Image (spheres, grey):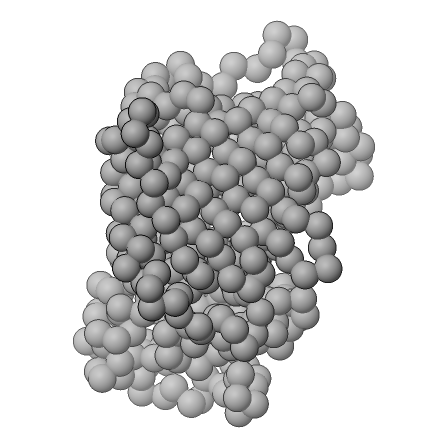
């Protein structure tokens, strides 16, 4: 967020836990890229034939775990996190969700405790190390808040597999292309099952422990990247309840605390992008080195999809996007992917695209957020989409997931 130097100075005393979470997010982004993308040239290999059945069983079971958690609207959970990649290796994170639109988060580390409260009525954070001050963050623009968006505002989105599972995402979709093998182990003396996957290129392992009702209990992972120290993460769910009260997610300022207000950011995309307006013209080169522009798609409906291989929510969108593309491409629907991968991850994009059957054109110049098209469109958050109708006008902005099918169908009908 853009904040004044005065406010930034005063916020420094509130930032210990936030710094921890930002470092965590950077570390997990690199780690997820290793898992999801691997090294070019080896990503498309299938597991050995004698292990494919075990991999299929493991993926099917993990999908059922995701289905068990899908649709949760209210819960209280505590996760103990240990990591070799964080400057503060241990943390306890308490997450309370109410009505899928209100979220309270507490992060406890050896450095102190940080608390955040997020709802359509207000976004507030403070640290118990300096309880004389709390921060009022500007509410985000765009669609109504959801728990998935709240995770991102709390800088927790994509940080843990547990959070992804609780919010309805399926880890099996992310891991499927990087597996070398799998084992499903059912404990004879405990009501638990471990779904363990071995990873390839880089070598690694990730194991999900669930109970007999298919509720997630723990996740342990380790990756051995080349020329780097092993990266290890452990998530242990120490409590999980399917109820939360209004009081749990209500923000009450510390007694006598001073409120610090942060100026609103410029938004997640250029506000000129709205239905009925003209999209910004551009020219670029696709992954095959061929020139691509909006003119190439005249008379067709086009979805411009801003994404990246390191973006967990982007990866989660791929199956739905692929299904809509296959359903409507014969009717004149096209997709143009604009990858915001930078020079460190750009090389893995073509193999990632191939493995995930993203059979539409893609742009990736390795400039990340500085990619000219992203700057033209003012993109500051992904996934982000612009749907252009047959008439060349914007039909919808930031439409995805379950809403994408209806939006494309409507755009094609005009």
Q: Determine which quarter of the picture holds residue 371.
A: bottom right
Between 296 and 49, the one lying in front of the other is 49
Residue at 21 percent of width and 70 percent of height:
409
Quarter of the C terminus within the rendering: bottom left
Q: Nearer the viewer, residue 185 or 285?
A: 185
Compared with 204, 306 (above or below) is below
Q: Residue furthest left?
A: 413
Can you give x and y, in whole percent of width and height, for residue 133 in the image?
68, 19
Please give left or right for residue 268 compared with residue 53 in the image.
right
Quadrant for the N terminus, please: top right
Q: Position of residue 131 (x, y in %)?
A: 67, 15
- Is residue 257 at least partly visible in the picture? yes
Query: Which quadrant would residue 18 be assigned to in this image?
Result: top right
Q: Point out residue 395 in the picture as x, y percentages from the top left corner.
A: 33, 69
Vertical comparison of 226 with 304: above or below: above
Viewer-side residue, 367 vs 45: 45
Q: Residue at x 33, y 68 (%)?
A: 49
- Asked whether residue 397 is in view, the answer is no
Occupied quadrant, residue 261: top right
Asked if residue 113 is positioned above or below residue 307 in the image, the reply reads: above
Numbered marks: total: 0
Q: Is residue 283 left or right of residue 355?
A: right
Q: Residue at x 57, y 40 (%)?
A: 233
Nearest the camera: 275 or 153?
Answer: 153
Q: Residue furthest top?
A: 255
Residue at x 40% of width, y 14% of height: 247
Residue 41: where, in percent of width, then height?
A: 54, 77
């Amino acid at each position: 967020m853009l904040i004044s130097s005065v406010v930034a100075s005063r916020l420094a005393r509130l930032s210990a836990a936030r710094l921890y979470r930002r470092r965590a997010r950077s570390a997990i982004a690199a780690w997820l890229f290793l898992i999801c993308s691997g090294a070019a040239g080896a990503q498309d290999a299938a597991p050995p034939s004698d292990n494919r059945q075990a991999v299929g069983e493991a993926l099917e079971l993990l999908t059922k775990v995701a289905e068990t958690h899908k649709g949760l609207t209210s819960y209280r959970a505590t996760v103990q996190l240990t990591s070799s990649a964080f400057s503060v290796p241990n943390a306890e994170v308490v997450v309370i969700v109410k009505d899928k639109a209100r979220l309270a988060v507490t992060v406890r580390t050896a450095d102190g405790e940080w608390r955040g409260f997020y709802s359509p009525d207000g976004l507030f954070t403070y640290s118990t190390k300096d309880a004389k001050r709390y921060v009022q963050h500007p509410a985000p623009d765009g669609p109504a808040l959801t728990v998935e968006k709240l995770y991102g505002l709390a800088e927790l989105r994509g940080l843990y597999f547990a959070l992804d599972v609780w919010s309805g995402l399926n880890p099996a979709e992310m891991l499927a292309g990087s597996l070398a093998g799998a084992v499903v182990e059912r404990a004879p003396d405990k009501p638990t099952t471990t779904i363990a996957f071995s990873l390839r290129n880089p070598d690694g392992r990730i194991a999900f422990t669930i109970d007999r009702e298919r509720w997630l209990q723990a996740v342990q992972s380790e990756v051995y990247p080349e020329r780097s120290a092993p990266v290890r993460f452990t998530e242990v769910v120490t409590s999980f309840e399917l109820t939360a009260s209004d009081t749990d997610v209500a923000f009450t300022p510390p007694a006598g605390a001073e409120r610090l207000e942060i100026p609103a950011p410029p938004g997640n995309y250029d506000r000129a992008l709205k239905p009925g307006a003209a999209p910004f013209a551009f020219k670029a080169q696709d992954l095959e080195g061929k020139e691509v522009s909006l003119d190439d798609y005249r008379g067709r409906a086009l979805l411009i999809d801003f994404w990246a291989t390191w973006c967990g929510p982007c990866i989660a969108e791929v199956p739905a996007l692929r299904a809509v593309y296959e359903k409507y491409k014969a009717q004149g629907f096209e997709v143009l992917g604009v990858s915001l991968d930078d020079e460190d991850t750009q090389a893995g994009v073509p193999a990632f695209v191939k493995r995930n059957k993203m059979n539409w054109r893609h742009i990736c110049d390795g400039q990340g957020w500085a990619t000219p098209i992203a700057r033209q469109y003012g993109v500051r958050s992904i996934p982000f989409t612009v749907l252009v109708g047959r008439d060349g006008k914007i039909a919808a902005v930031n439409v995805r997931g379950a809403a994408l099918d209806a939006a494309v169908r409507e755009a094609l009908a005009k």
